[in-house]
Amino acid sequence: MRADIRRGVAAAVRLAQGESVRDVLDVRDPRAWLGLDTGVRADEFFCPPGVVQWDRMAGARELTDVLRGPGPLTESQLALALCHRDGRIRQAALDRTAGYPVLLPVVVLRCAEWAPPVRDRARQRLAEGLDALTAVSLAPMILLVGRRNRADFAVGLLDETLRRAPATGSSRSAPARAVAGLRVLDVADVRRLRPLVDDPAAGVVREVTAAQLPSAELVPEEWLTERLGARWPRPVQVAAFRLLDARGGSVRRRAAEALSDDPDVKLRGWAERAVKQG
């Protein structure tokens, strides 16, 4: 915890000194943004010993006046303003985020914050800025923040945007890339991903299945068994079988028996091997 705060405080100091956001943060890592958000507001009580906060530096008062004022802000100053402990500064900063897509992860954070005026403004900005492409890059951040209170708006907007995205059938489609990113960052949420097993794009189904395999026991057996039926597209059948097979034991055996007379030769072959494995 202290290490995270220390890194966040150090990042805030570098931004206050004028370094660019991309030089200071790994902008693809949601945890880097969470650290910055904490670091900007860290006070002496929570700050690790020997670490100086950005607002204790020489020139901090002048910088705070700039953040509070109506004038233009640099990208680095805007990042600080979006995380500032003063809600009025955070709210005003949200009106200046147009043209700074790199800062959308902080907008996601503000969508789940406690202050209603800031939260409402952030949700408006996210709704304006989220499309199929930005959804791919923001999905890990949105679902990580989605574990907090008041985060349902951003998660719902993400799901809606991904479902509207063109489904090309390729694993490189926007929803598939988003789910792959979640899997790499280990922030996949089984409950929220489950409906995408039925996605019409085979690439999405494959990525969702891979993301859920480590937690296959959390996906209801009855729900998966239904999707073994011949009326479902083959990618969905394969996904259901893989998730049931991953649970082993009697669950694996029942899934294999359900596919024993499936018209698809490959599915029947997998079922036969599963029966032999017990």
Image (cartoon, grey):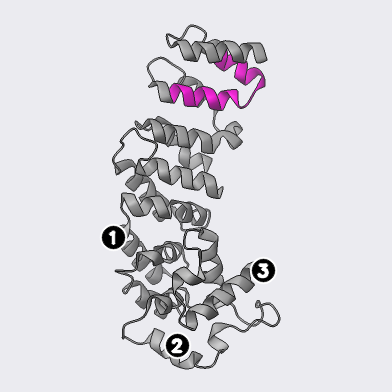
278 or 25: which is nearer to us?
25
Label 3 sits on residue: 3
Q: Residues within 10 Å of mark 3 (few under 14, many from 20)?
A: few
What is the quadrant of residue 2 in the picture?
bottom right
Residue at position x 48%, y 82% from top? 16
Q: Residues within 10 Å of mark 1 (few under 14, many from 20)?
A: few
Residue at position x 29%, y 43% from top? 164
Label 2 sits on residue: 64
Percent x, y of residue 61: 48, 92
Percent x, y of residue 232: 39, 20
Alpha-carbon span between mark 3 and mark 2: 26 Å
Alpha-carbon span between mark 3 and mark 1: 35 Å
Q: Amino acid at mark 2?
A: Thr
Look at the image and tell me whether residue 21 can be seen: yes
Q: Amino acid at mark 1?
A: Glu
Mark toward the start of the polypeptide (3 vs 1): 3
Start and end of the magenta stretch? 236-256
Mark toward the start of the polypeptide (2 vs 1): 2
Percent x, y of residue 124: 31, 63
Q: Is residue 2 magenta?
A: no
